[in-house]
Image (cartoon, helix red, strand yellow):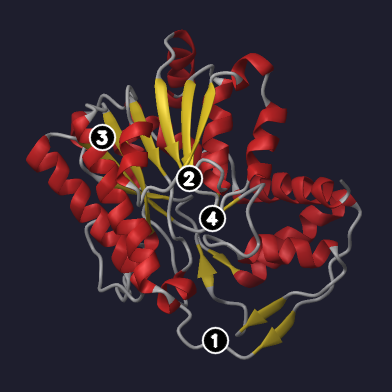
Amino acid sequence: MTAYDRLRQELTAEPCTWLITGVAGFIGSHLLEALLTLDQRVIGLDNLSTGTPRNLDLVRDGVTPKQWSRFQFHEGSVADMSACREATDRVDYILHHAGFVSVPLSLEDPIACHDTNVTGTLNLLTSARDNRVRRVVYASSSAVYGDDTRLPKVEAQIGRPLSPYGASKWMSEIYARLFLESYGLENIGLRYFNIFGPRQDPAGGYAAVIPQWIAAMLGGGECVIHGDGTITRDFCPVANVVQANLLAATTRHGAAVGQVFNVALGGSTTLRELHELIAKALTSVGTQAKPIRYGPPRPGDIQHSSADTSAIRRALDFEPEVSISAGLEQTVQWYAKAANR
């Protein structure tokens, strides 16, 4: 039995109260579904700027009516202090995933990015401190590695941010550390690498190439690779992110508190290989993918990215349950069903 298996048994036996910010988003809705399945009490906060009520409807359809009755939704923004204070009242754990997640949009509107990612996180940490929340787990990003070219990415080695988005995530990490050192508010940060899975918005952040390509292939279109297809990424199924969050929130390993961990598979997949994996998964729904079309490289694209996951495995007993191929199979099946609804 894994540490995650044991944790799920413990949570089912002794339910807690959780706050998920960004609950109607891609990752937030998966966290909600997992917690409700474990009979937890969940409060959700979302201003629905990028999250959608449809994601919440899909979660409702996937759990029992009794489990759904344990969920309470608050429409509001983390940039609003009063909304944060209300949502964090009588909460045991916070999973903070409300965020401005687009690098290109952060370059267009750095103020909006700062308001959500920095001011919003500061509001939440302050409210959690005042309401005596046990622990905050917050979403950071591999974007904090910035211009550092060393591979694989190791938590202690970061460069200069290359976007307002990367800078905002780094600032969130700084505030979280200060709140532990100054006020004793326990927290753990999770740096996500190219997360994908069902319910992901093709126009959103994270690993948008995957839903974009799946949608194109299901519609009979072609996929374009900018460059020669050798760009690599560390793609990670969202189920593994759920595991990392629950382990981080409840770990009894004191040395893990105040740390920031990479969340990934610790692998490296080229875009050419990714296309092949998606094309293979599409055969299970009767779709034949068209050959790749290659285009000119895009200025500013990072060529290679992979994560060292030894720290999170050691500190939190993290063991990814879903591989990239299995995750793509699940994701393709979901998008195929969604297209036929």
Q: Which residue appears farthest toward the left when viewing the image?
A: 182
SS at badge 4: loop
Can the viewer see residue 297 in this picture? yes
Q: Earlier in the sequence, mark 1 or mark 4?
A: 4
Q: State whether residue 168 is above or below residue 54.
A: below
| Amino acid on which the number 4 mark rests in the picture | Ser
State how far apart marks 3 and 2 are (Cα): 16 Å
Q: Earlier in the sequence, mark 3 or mark 1?
A: 3
| Amino acid on which the number 2 mark rests in the picture | Gly
Q: Earlier in the sequence, mark 3 or mark 2?
A: 2
Tell me which corner region of the image, top left, top right, bottom left or bottom right, holds residue 321.
top right
Callout 3–callout 2 Cβ contact below 8 Å: no
| Amino acid on which the number 3 mark rests in the picture | Ala
State how far apart marks 1 and 2 are (Cα): 31 Å
Q: Residue at x 44, y 16 (%)?
A: 11
Residue position for label 1: 298
Can the viewer see residue 154 in this picture? no
Residue 309, given in percent of the width and then of the height, sits at 37, 49
Callout 3–callout 4 Cβ contact below 8 Å: no
Residue 175, given in percent of the width and then of the height, sits at 19, 51
| Amino acid on which the number 1 mark rests in the picture | Arg
Q: Which residue appears farthest toward the front when viewing the image?
A: 82
Query: Tag on residue 49?
Result: 4
- 3 vs 1, front mark: 3
Residue position for label 2: 22
Residue 20, given in percent of the width and then of the height, sits at 44, 36
Q: Earlier in the sequence, mark 3 or mark 4?
A: 4
Q: State whether residue 71 is above or below residue 78.
A: above
- 1 vs 2, front mark: 2
State how far apart marks 3 and 4 are (Cα): 23 Å
Residue position for label 3: 128
- Tell me if mark 3 has few (under 14), some (14-19) or many (20+) residues whose alpha carbon lies within 10 angstroms of its own: many
